[in-house]
Image (tube, helix red, strand yellow):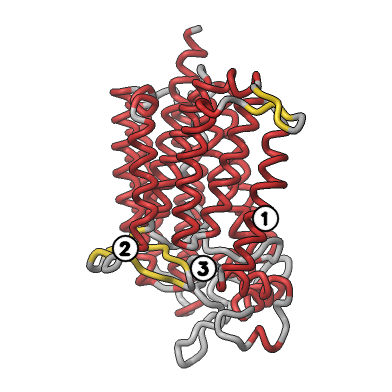
Amino acid sequence: MLRPRNRELLALVPAGLLVTGGFAAIFIQSSKRLSDLSLTYGLAFLGLCVITHLAIRFVLPDADPYLFPLAAVLASFGLVIVYRISPTLARQQAQWYVLGLVLFAGTILFLRRHGLVVLERYRYTIATVGIAMLVLPRLPGIGEQVNGAYLNIKLGSIKFQPAELAKLAIVIFLASYLRDTRQILAGGGRRILGVEVPPMRITGPMLLIWGAAMGMLLLTRELGTSLMFFGVFVALLYVALGRVRFPVIGLLVIWWAGAYFISQHVGHVHERIQAWQHPFDPVLYNKVGGSYQLAQSLFAQADGGLLGTGFNESLLQLPNGHFILPVPESDFIYSVITNELGLAGATGLLLCYLLFVARGLKTAVLAPNSFAKLLAVGLSFIVALQVFVIVGGVTRVIPLTGVTMPFVAYGGSSVVMNFVLLGLLLAVSDRARREMASG
């Protein structure tokens, strides 16, 4: 029977094969010849994965053996699709992958030396930094508005989405705070309208930090991330307290009331809801900021059918360079995948995400203390909710929002922070499995 680390090493082979095969298919379709460059790309990607595997082997020898290979498969899939859309963007994405792996290594080395306790000790500092980062896109000079939302900060040629860092900071704070107060919160307090409400001195700091984060997101109009933050908050409350009423009340009262208010008073959100309800309306389709993006996404997915049109076969650009499907490398990359690989390829991608989330939740089950459990749950739900929000948006399950697919879509800040997220999960897993083996 293979040891866990050897299983991890063996499981990296499909990622290298996917890069090699994907690039080979693109080269054959574009130039009608097979280039050895696809093999070079595949070996380079596999080499980076093996180097990272060696870091895990020596730093976190007992960590889950499947989380990193699943992330590598998703990353390889994304690199091939982004290259198919734009070789220039793919080269930039590869550079972000390298930086992400460097920060991943730094994360696991730091946590191996100091332990998870350092995150609990500085939870307020971490939360404050995360909230402060959220407001940066609204500052003149460095903030940048995209499609009605303030997403990026721009320093020269470098762009960064602070929300990617903030999501980790808020999860760390909530996991730590709920670990200390969950028994008091579950025990209830004064009765208001027949419902036990915990003391404000206990709920106040948590609601203040979470409310500030949500407020900053509303200030920047980043509603996709707001939805993700709210979902993680509700999930952690449910896991920590084991009371269904908390997520139900939050969902029915806070979210729906807030969603209705925002949809009526924030212009671009109202337009997106109109586009979601009537994507094929001729007036909305031809209106700037209307339903053109969503309608084109649905057309692309329908065109893919069961098995897809094949790599490099979908029509993304007109001869004048205009993209038929807007922002295919990030917001609508799932539509490109469904068009070229069909329902079968899209299902395979979603299964990889499901396996990643399942391994993260298994890590939570094995975690030795409440903080580690809640941290693993929060990190896993971040990935799950991001996938739900973007896939739900482009398939018209929910209104369209601008959240990227983890490890797959183009975006430097998303790629880098998702590798940091992976490092946190593996650190929790290593400690949990080591204590289980020794105990």
Label 2: which secondary element? loop
Q: Mark 2 points at which residue?
A: 139
Label 1: which secondary element? helix
Label 3: which secondary element? helix
Distance CA(mark 3)–CA(mark 2): 45 Å
Residue 203 vertical placement versus 340 (above, below): above
Residue 140 in the figure: left or right of residue 419:
left
Residue 106 in the figure: left or right of residue 205:
left
Q: Where in the figure is residue 243, as x and y percent of width and height?
A: 70, 28
Question: In front here: 363 or 288?
Answer: 288
Residue 76 shows in this picture: no
Question: In front here: 359 or 70?
Answer: 359
Q: Name the residue under label 3.
A: 25
Residue 434 vertical placement versus 359 (above, below): above
What residue do we see at 35% from left, 51% from top? 133
Q: Where in the figure is residue 356, as x and y percent of width and height?
A: 56, 41
Check the picture and name the quadrant holding the N terminus: top right
**Residue mark closest to the camera, 3 vs 2:** 2
Q: Tag 2: residue type?
A: Leu
Mark 2 crowd level (few <14, some 14–19, many ≥20, 10 Å Cα): few
Mark 3 crowd level (few <14, some 14–19, many ≥20, 10 Å Cα): many
Lower sequence index among marks 1 and 2: 2
Residue 229 in the figure: left or right of residue 79:
right
Distance CA(mark 1)–CA(mark 3): 20 Å
Q: Tag 3: residue type?
A: Ala
Residue 292 vertical placement versus 205 (above, below): below
**Residue mark closest to the camera, 1 vs 2:** 2
How many marks are shown on the rendered structure?
Answer: 3
